[in-house]
Amino acid sequence: MDVRRRNNINISGKIGAQPMLFAHGFGCDQNMWRFVAPAFEADYEVVLFDHVGAGQSDPSAWRPGKYDSLRGYADDVLEICRELGLERVIFVGHSVSSVMGVLAAVAEPERFDALVLVGPSPRYVDDEGYVGGFSNEDIEGLLESLESNYLGWSSAMAPVIMGNADRPELGEELTNSFCRTNPEIARHFARVTFLSDNRQDLPQVRTRTLVLQCSDDVIAPQAVGEFVHRQIPGSALVHLKATGHCPNLSAPEETIAAIRAFLV
Amino acid sequence: MAEFEESYGLAHRAAFEESAEELYEEAPCGYLSTDPDGRIVRVNRTLLRWTGYTEEQLVGQRRFVDLLTAGGRIYHETHYAPLLRMQGSVREIALDLRCADGANLPMLVNSTTKNDAAGRPLVVRTMLFDARHRREYERELLRARERAEGADRAKAEFISMVSHEIRTPLGAIMAVGHLLETTEPSERQQKYLRILRSSAENLHSLINDILDFSRSEAGKLELDERPFELRPLLQEIVTPQRVRVEQRGVDLVLEVAESCPEHLIGDRVKIGQILTNLIGNAVKFTEAGSIRVEAVPWETDEGSVTLGLTVSDTGIGISPDRLPHIFDAFTQASPEVSSKYGGTGLGLAITKRLVELHGGELRVESEVGRGSVFRCGLRLRRAAPTPTAEAAAAAAEEAPLRGLRVLVADDNEVNVVVMVDLLRGWGATTDIARDGSEAVDRCRSERYDAVLMDLRMPKMDGYRATREIRGGPGGAELPIIAVSASMRMGESVEVQEGGFTDFVGKPIRPDLLLQKLGRWVREAG
């Protein structure tokens, strides 16, 4: 198994320095970190990858069973660490990848120096005494939404080539489609992500942890971020001014500053 | 005059501006503008009419994402918003709007971000198209596809089940025919037996073709790659066919280029099928002249070879109008061909798929009255030479199974009679178990040199019995040969996973059974 090819691993920054491993969430690929990761290249070895089924990963590596729970994805994170010989890893996970980082750090605590969880949620569906923000029907609605969009996938997700005078450095890459996903795997990943429940894993974390909580995040509401913060011993919680679920795209400077302040 | 022009110009411009405004408000699509945080700053009348909201309820009050269904909100946040941030625009995203009365309105959404001079997002302009009909069509298409796929699956399963059910009694007919031949039949009876045998064999190969085809339709064909030697394999394939044509005075020539590597890794069963089908066709359609089978390496590198196989004949040929269709399933060169020569019209369709499985392409050239040439290249890996099992197999035929004890586990009376008679004929002693648990008990109390294990038995099936025997004393080394009508090409994985040493298909070919028993008993020491 060629892990580098399977997960389309890209390494940049200061090779040999302390590694920062960035994990993207559901719906996109490592492009999610394009405005954040470069800021750390001067001081860290920056490792980017795509989950199996997303971006330029090798979809043939996908196996039912292994990827039926987030643990399978967490195993991939550990395999990447082992393959690259990463130690004292700073894991930065967005959305569902936060939980993968938690699972990986609980399994091999000695390998991780810090966890940065951006918009984490251990459970998306409401439960007794817990507000995740969604019902089971809502998740079915998402799957329908995926279905409708994958029908027209080629037009909806096709590369958009546009005049990009404000960011000429992106021009070349824009000819490639961002966030290309294998529809079958994405459907499965959506189910695994939004029906997961990893609340009991949070208290097991022994790694220093930063929780980044956005304003008006419909996917991971404030109450969920606070829950994560309460459950992970000694964790820090930072509220971002950024709205929505993707501060790494909408407010990269604020996100970078919060991560830097935590790591110093 | 100047005054008039001035006032006309003003009036004209006012009229134009009003019309632009109207175009916006009454456009046949919804318009909606939001600030970078998603808050609605402007919305046109069309969208208000569609959704049943008032301008006051939306502008400055809600974000675009608030108008979506819960599932749509997740999609918006995980796909739509990131793409918009990265690309500056998104096109044709399917989302449902939640109307004021709670109803869902399927939309097709396009958004573009307008940036300020510093490149910061200023406003997002969104156009929404009514997609109710389109969504209905899409759903209908999906349903139709699911129905069609379901029907296809059901058909394939039905074919597979029926073929399987036919194969079991047919196996008994063939095996009993074989036994009858050993009872010194009269000349007349021998003639009947020959007809019985050839009809049964035809029916058998027909059913195998149907099963292979339905398997390849279902995408279940896989290569079972093992080391093999090229020249002996080709000889093995060509020899039986040569016997058939020589009676007719047709030459069957096999030529293997010297540059062909001898040791290869591939699926010898499927390579055999490819060549047997092609040569079988040539044999069928060639009344005089010759058939040439050539093997030439087309491309060779250190690790692999593209083995070019060519089968050419001087037969009846195929007319140009039929040529493009000969690889289609259930197609023959003409109705006369099918009535004169028989066959299902599946052979070439299967062969083509088998070639494609090897990364090659099956091509044909033909001229009516002159003959046909079929060509394909199979991508095979090269192997290091290994000692062959052939010498051992030959020895086994000379030395039958005298002194061996074999347990026959099968609940089917006919199968038991056939196998026991064969085994006794080879000098082995036999015991019989009528179900899996009896087989397990017998293996615990007696010592056997081999077990023939039927897979479907009452009480305990062959898989479980094999697991239990393997777990018992001496069970790990015992040759257990699965006997099944359901296993054929590409299912050797099942053999390994089931813990079997090997398998023989039903109907049982005595020569194969003898060969396999001999081989495994010898290997077990």
Image (tube, rainbow, N blue to C red):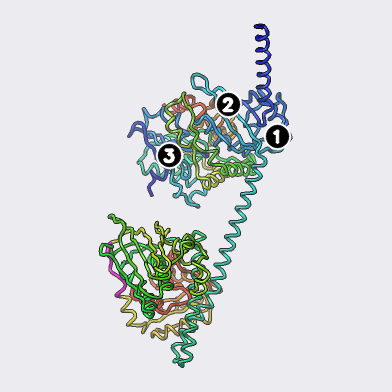
Quick check: is B508 in the magenta stretch?
Answer: no
Residue annotated with mark 1: B99
Amino acid type of disc 2? Val
- Disc with the residue nearer the chain's start (1 vs 2): 1
Which chain is mark 2 on? B
Q: Are marks 3 and 2 on the same chain?
A: no
For residue A131, above or below residue B438: above
Q: Residue at x 37, y 47 (%)?
A: A2
In 3D space, how far apart are the residues under numbered discs 3 and 2 (Cα atoms)? Answer: 30 Å
Residue annotated with mark 3: A49
What is the residue that sits farthest to the bottom in this orientation? B186
Quick check: is B388 in the magenta stretch?
Answer: yes
Instruction: Work out which quarter of the rendered image holds the C terminus of chain B and state it.
Output: bottom left
Q: Residue at x 40, y 62 (%)?
A: B365
Residue A72 rendering spot, x and y as whole percentages: 47, 47
Q: Main secondary structure of the magenta part?
A: loop
Residue annotated with mark 2: B124
Q: Residue at x 39, y 57 (%)?
A: B360
